Amino acid sequence: MNDCCDILLIATVACQIASCLNDDELGLLAADMVLLSDALGAIAVRRSLRDEDSDNCDAPSACSHFF
C-alpha cells in the first residue's frame, strides 16, 4: 500500500497548483511537465545503456555514441 502514498501526494499537489492557476496556465504547466517527464525518462534510459555498455567496452571509442 506504500505505492499509494506517492500517488496521493502528487494528486494533492496537483489540486493545490490547479487552484492557483487559470485554465491556460494550467494547460501550459501540464504540457511542460509532460516534456520534463519525457526528458527525464530519456536521460534515465541513456544512463542505463551507458552503464550497461561500459561493462562491455574495452576502448572508449567503442562507446562514443553514448557521450
Image (cartoon, helix red, strand yellow):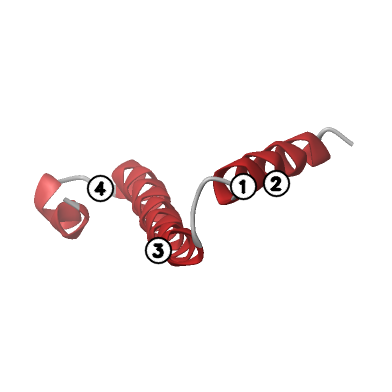
Local crowd size for mark 4, using a 10 Å CA cut-off: few (<14), some (14–19), many (≥20)? few
Q: Amino acid at mark 3?
A: Leu
Total labels drawn: 4
Q: Are marks 2 and 1 in contact (CB under 8 Å)?
A: yes
Mark nearer the N terminus (4 vs 3): 3
The image's mark for residue 57 is 4
The residue where tag 3 is placed is 28
The image's mark for residue 11 is 2
Q: Amino acid at mark 1?
A: Ala
x, y percent for residue 23 = 51, 65
Q: Amino acid at mark 2?
A: Ala
Local crowd size for mark 3, using a 10 Å CA cut-off: few (<14), some (14–19), many (≥20)? few
Disc 4/disc 3 C-alpha distance (Å): 43 Å
Q: Determine the residue positioned at 49% across, 59% down.
A: 22
Q: Are marks 3 and 2 in contact (CB under 8 Å)?
A: no
Disc 3/disc 2 C-alpha distance (Å): 18 Å
Q: Are marks 3 and 1 in contact (CB under 8 Å)?
A: no
Q: Are marks 4 and 1 in contact (CB under 8 Å)?
A: no
Disc 4/disc 2 C-alpha distance (Å): 43 Å
In the rendered view of the protein, which quadrant contains the N terminus? Answer: top right
Most extreme residue toward the right is: 1
In screen coordinates, is 23 left or right of 9? Answer: left
Mark nearer the N terminus (4 vs 2): 2
In screen coordinates, is 5 left or right of 21? Answer: right
Q: Amino acid at mark 4?
A: Cys
The residue where tag 1 is placed is 14
SS type, badge 2: helix
x, y percent for residue 16 = 62, 41
Q: Nearer the viewer, residue 46 or 18?
A: 18
